Amino acid sequence: MAEPAIELIDIDKRFGLVRANRRVNLTVERGTIHGIVGENGAGKSTLMSIIYGFYQADSGEIKVGGRTVEITDPNAAIAAGIGMVHQHFMLVENFTVVENVMLGAEQSPLLRSGIAKVRAELKRLEADHSLNVDPDAVVEELPVGRQQRVEILKALYRGAEILILDEPTGVLTPAEADHLFAVLRQLRDEGKTIILITHKLREIMAITDRVSVMRQGEMVATRQTAETSVGELAELMVGRRVLLTVDKQPAAPGAVRLDVRGLTVRDGRGVTMVDDVSLTVRAGEIVGIAGVAGNGQSELLEALSGIRRAEAGRIAMAGHEIDPCVEADPAMLRRIGCAHVPEDRHNMGLVLAFEENENAMLGYQRDKRFARGPLLDRDAMRRDAREKIEAYDIRPPDCRLKTANFSGGNQQKIVLAREMERDPEVLLIGQPTRGVDVGAIEFIHRRIIAMRDAGKAILLVSVELDEIRALSDRILVMFSGRIVGERGPHASEGEIGLLMAGVHEREAAE
Ligand SMILES: Nc1ncnc2c1ncn2[C@@H]1O[C@H](COP(=O)(O)OP(=O)(O)OP(=O)(O)O)[C@@H](O)[C@H]1O
């Protein structure tokens, strides 16, 4: 039998007291798509960073094609035929596609023979793998799906035989995700090996050949995908049965707590992203905004939370009239009882260089309970942070750890705990479970329902249609900046999907 594409033997990695990888063994066969799943902080990204040479294992061995390799840095990984598509793209945004692909590969013989050859090679790779990107396009002007294709091209250009993708669909529209999967299947059929990390178990079932499960730094199981199920994988990940559906009673809505009239918002380039939107959210109800990413949901949430100034409209929130067209003031909105979980935790939700306990109260630093005279009461902050760490099972449970050193899903929980535990009257919540494992999704969904049942008005924006359908009491569909339809909680996926795709209201109802 052919040698496996890659073998990891007894890989160990510690960060201080945290044992991120414990004697991990993994065999990935050539020409297969191998999924890696595991709860937040299980050690998936660390393991991939070791394969790609960002980190060095404390001990253990890596074999590529049967031969032991020393992967001391990403260049050594590339030389061994390993490529990586990162969760947060590593592209230079104001460079063109071809420049990005060349960057770091300046020594390649192809480049020395002239940029025209590089462009020709890129065109060949694009055509062979249906990657369709213009080599001369500037990266920042490309939609995220295409930027991701540039990352794939970059890896293929460097001769990658093994491609690692870390949560590649988190930022993609459903159509972009389908296209990515078609590309990955084709690469596999050509004999390349794909390692895919994702929290979306449905994706694992749809596209992988085998799947391995990590828990608390250990590799606990490997299955043939055809012989397992979402339920089994979820249980293997978190060590208990996970309810994959949300239990809730019908809503008992009260008074209107959020009333938006004629809101119009433009983006930085002057393009109208939110076009004359009106909506209401009552106490004790969850209103979900469904839509394919990029249809104005983000700008709507930003305008409501005071991050972005609107062009027109008015807002009444928690009994206060707000003019969304004047200078934005998120602090004032917090004071009147509005909490906001932003979609983009890195840029809007957290300061990664701060300690966990500082992020756990970011934006609420003027609260009396954190004050000691004119200073901050550090003890009170840490006490508060520890309570949230416990309630939200944030790992590792260390409120002094720098936020950058938490795994992606745990960072998300830090933001959720801060905003949801403030007991707000109105909760604006964007992509609450992005990057979060199935066990944590179950917990977060229960918390959101509990807040609704306690009379909070909740506006939920999510690109996950399953999440919108599971949580919302009313569903508003946004397309091209407008609300194009409203449906009850039992509307079918197909009906909402049609509205999301811009099919007219009447046709969608038929
Ligand atoms: N540079 C670092 N310094 C300290 N601790 C770290 C560092 N990188 C990761 N860790 C810790 O190692 C553990 C594993 O993290 P890792 O990012 O590999 O998890 P993950 O399985 O990818 O999680 P997620 O699904 O949330 O992305 C976590 O406890 C994390 O806090």
Image (tube, rainbow, N blue to C red):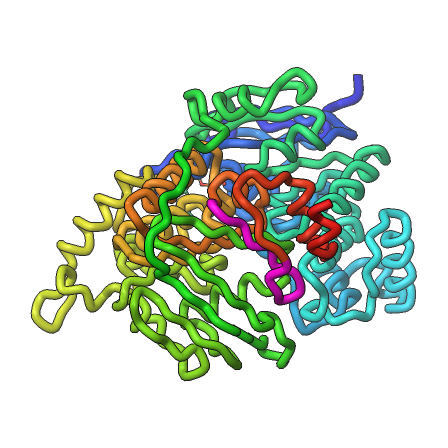
The answer to whether any part of residue 66 appears in the image is no
Q: Quadrant of residue 40?
A: top left
Extreme residue in the bottom direction: 326
Residue at the image point whose x is 36% and y is 44% from the top: 252
Residue 21 on image: x %, y %: 46, 32
Give the main secondary structure of the magenta stretch. strand
Q: 394 or 450, which is in the foreground? A: 450
- Report the front residue among 353 and 257: 257
Check if residue 146 falls in the magenta segment.
no
Q: Is residue 458 left or right of residue 30?
A: left
In which quadrant of the rendered view does residue 18 lie?
top left
Residue 462: image x %, image y %?
A: 53, 51
**Residue at x 48%, y 26% (from the top left corner):** 237
Q: Is residue 438 above or below residue 73?
A: above
* Figure quadrant of the N terminus: top right
Q: Who is closer to the viewer here, 162 or 343?
A: 343
Q: How many numbered circles are shown?
A: 0
Query: In the displayed structure, does residue 428 sit left or right of residue 159?
Result: left
* Left or right: residue 502 compared with residue 331: right
Along the line of sight, the residue nearer the viewer: 154 or 454: 454
Picture coordinates of residue 84, whole percent (x, y): 66, 47
View quadrant of ligand 1: top left
Can residue 257 be seen in this snapshot?
yes
Location of residue 230 with respect to 141 vertically, above or below: above
Image quarter hosting the C terminus: top right
Quick check: 188 above or below 156? above
Q: Is residue 454 left or right of residue 154?
A: left
Residue positioned 55% across, 32% down in the render: 37
Q: Which residues are magenta?
A: 473-484
Can you give x and y, in whole percent of width and height, for residue 13 in the image? 45, 36
